[in-house]
Image: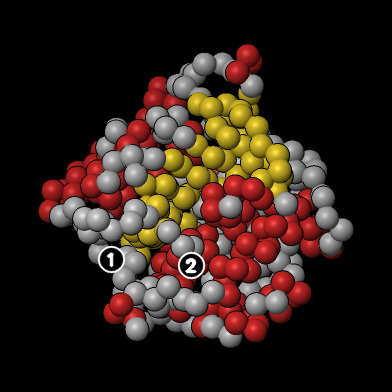
């Protein structure tokens, strides 16, 4: 059954009618952004949609990458609430001297999923390893340390420092639509958190997905296996032994993920959990950044806890340095929204076996060369900061 016709789809549609009125009203007053002067060298245009936590992840790498212009960072709840993610994003652009890049707050809650529904699901099917801001501290496992924060508006003091700049007053989904309309078939969209903003943008503008150049997202899980001999890597890999198809970005908002998966994207690259179990932030890698002694490398020393896999970093680096990808496969992808034990699980097929219910082909990154990736990351982290003129 297509998502438009199921119960969750009806719930989503009600929410989308509201967002359509608000978002399109904003679009009517927004002016297109001029990207480059005539004759200037073309840069690859990027939008980042993320539940930003810390200074690592996709934003810092893409902001530092040569030949890349980040048009904006939109934020969503996921690992932390939206307002906390927004604070991290603002602090990131401050540290990198890129306050010219707008930070635009997006969705606070999933389309359908809720804390109460999650607790009910756990009572039937077992405890979830990580629930973002709904995670009880006593039950947080697999290296996840985000404390439960019942109020979305409570923003804790950030370990990387609190921002002094303010976010945009525009709504994230409306901003995404506006930027894509102004630059059709030119923008690479990075979705490295839950897909709520992406789903709302698709509802605001049915041509949104088709007008994006390509979508790169971190989410989903196929069959992760431990592939490096490091304690934290083994711990994270064990999380998926009995639940190989479950991953947090998708499980937070499965309905939004399904809407995303049915979009008419010209090209989609999926980075599931699978390659991340072969990576890990280590003290050795962080120490190798120290000689650069920039605001970015200095803050990474104190603002990042070693032991975590390089989740979002893989998405950024697989796009920036495709040679790091050692195994990829074309699969048709969808996500389970059945409200049963598989709620939020990744569904995948080869062409001959797919159900033909709107699922689309995606390039799925399954393995990366960790050493090559770390070398490319090191080069970006340690280079002089790409400061905006107003920050110099």
Dividing the picture into quarters, in which one does residue 298 lie?
A: bottom right
In the image: residue 355, left or right of residue 162? right
Which residue is at 61% across, 37% downward? 364
Q: Which mark is residue 50?
A: none
Residue 189, how many percent across, how many down?
42, 48
* Quadrant in which the C terminus appears: bottom left
> Tag 2, which secondary structure?
helix
Which numbered marker is on residue 64? 2
Which residue is located at x 18 percent, y 49 percent? 27
Q: Nearer the viewer, residue 386 or 139?
A: 386
The residue beneath circle 1 is 168
Task: For marks 1 and 2, give the CA distance.
Answer: 22 Å
Label 2, residues with CA under 10 Å away: few <14, some 14-19, many ≥20: many
Q: Nearer the viewer, residue 249 or 361?
A: 361
Extreme residue in the right direction: 229
Position of residue 153 measured from the top left corner of the image (x, y, whole percent): 40, 69
Circle 1: is it few (<14), some (14-19), or many (20+) Cα within 10 Å?
few
Residue 303 at least partly seen? no
In the displayed orientation, state which residue is furthest to the left. 29
Counting from the top left corner in percent of width and height, residue 159 is at 55, 80
Residue 2 horizontal/vertical position (percent): 45, 21
| Color scheme of the displayed model | secondary structure
Q: Counting residues from the N terminus, which is met first, the one under dot 1 or under dot 2?
A: 2
The answer to whether 36 appears left or right of 164 in the picture is left
Q: Residue at x 63, y 69 (%)?
A: 378
**Any part of residue 101 in sight:** yes
What element does badge 1 sit on? loop
Residue closer to the observer: 16 or 159: 159
Q: Nearer the viewer, mark 1 or mark 2?
A: 2
Please name the residue shown 62% across and 62% down the image.
Answer: 376
Above or below residue 159? Residue 350 is above
């Amino acid at each position: 059954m297509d998502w438009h016709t199921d119960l969750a789809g009806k719930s989503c549609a009600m929410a989308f009618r509201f967002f359509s009125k608000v978002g399109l009203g904003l679009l009517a007053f927004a002016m297109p952004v001029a990207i480059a002067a005539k004759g200037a060298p073309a840069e690859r245009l990027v939008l980042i949609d993320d539940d930003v936590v810390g200074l690592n992840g996709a934003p810092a790498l893409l902001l530092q990458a040569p030949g890349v212009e980040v048009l904006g960072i939109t934020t969503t709840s996921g690992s932390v609430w939206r307002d906390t993610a927004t604070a991290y994003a603002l602090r990131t652009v401050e540290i990198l001297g890129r306050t010219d890049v707008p930070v635009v707050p997006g969705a606070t809650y999933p389309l359908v999923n809720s804390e109460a529904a999650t607790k009910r699901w756990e009572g039937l099917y077992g405890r979830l390893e990580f629930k973002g801001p709904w995670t009880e501290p006593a039950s947080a496992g697999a290296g996840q340390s985000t404390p439960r924060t019942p109020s979305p508006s409570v923003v804790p003091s950030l370990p990387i420092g609190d921002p002094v700049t303010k976010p945009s007053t525009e709504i994230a989904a409306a901003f995404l639509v506006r930027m894509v309309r102004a630059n059709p078939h030119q923008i690479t969209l990075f979705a490295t958190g839950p897909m709520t903003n992406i789903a709302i943008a698709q509802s605001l503008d049915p041509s949104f997905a088709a007008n994006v150049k390509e979508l790169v997202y971190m989410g989903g899980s196929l069959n992760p296996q431990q592939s490096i001999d490091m304690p934290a890597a083994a711990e994270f890999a064990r999380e998926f032994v009995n639940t190989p198809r479950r991953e947090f970005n998708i499980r937070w908002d499965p309905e939004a993920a399904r809407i995303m998966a049915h979009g008419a994207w010209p090209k989609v690259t999926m980075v599931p959990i699978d390659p991340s179990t072969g990576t890990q932030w280590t003290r050795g890698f962080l120490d190798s950044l120290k000689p650069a002694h920039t605001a970015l490398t200095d803050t990474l020393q104190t603002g990042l806890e070693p032991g975590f896999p390089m989740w979002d970093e893989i998405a950024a680096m697989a796009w920036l340095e495709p040679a790091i990808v050692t195994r990829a496969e074309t699969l048709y992808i969808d996500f389970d929204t059945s409200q049963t034990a598989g709620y939020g699980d990744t569904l995948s097929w080869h062409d001959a076996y797919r159900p033909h219910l709107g699922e689309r082909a995606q390039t799925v990154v399954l393995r990366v060369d960790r050493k090559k990736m770390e070398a490319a990351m090191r080069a970006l982290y340690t280079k002089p900061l790409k400061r905006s003129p107003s920050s110099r």
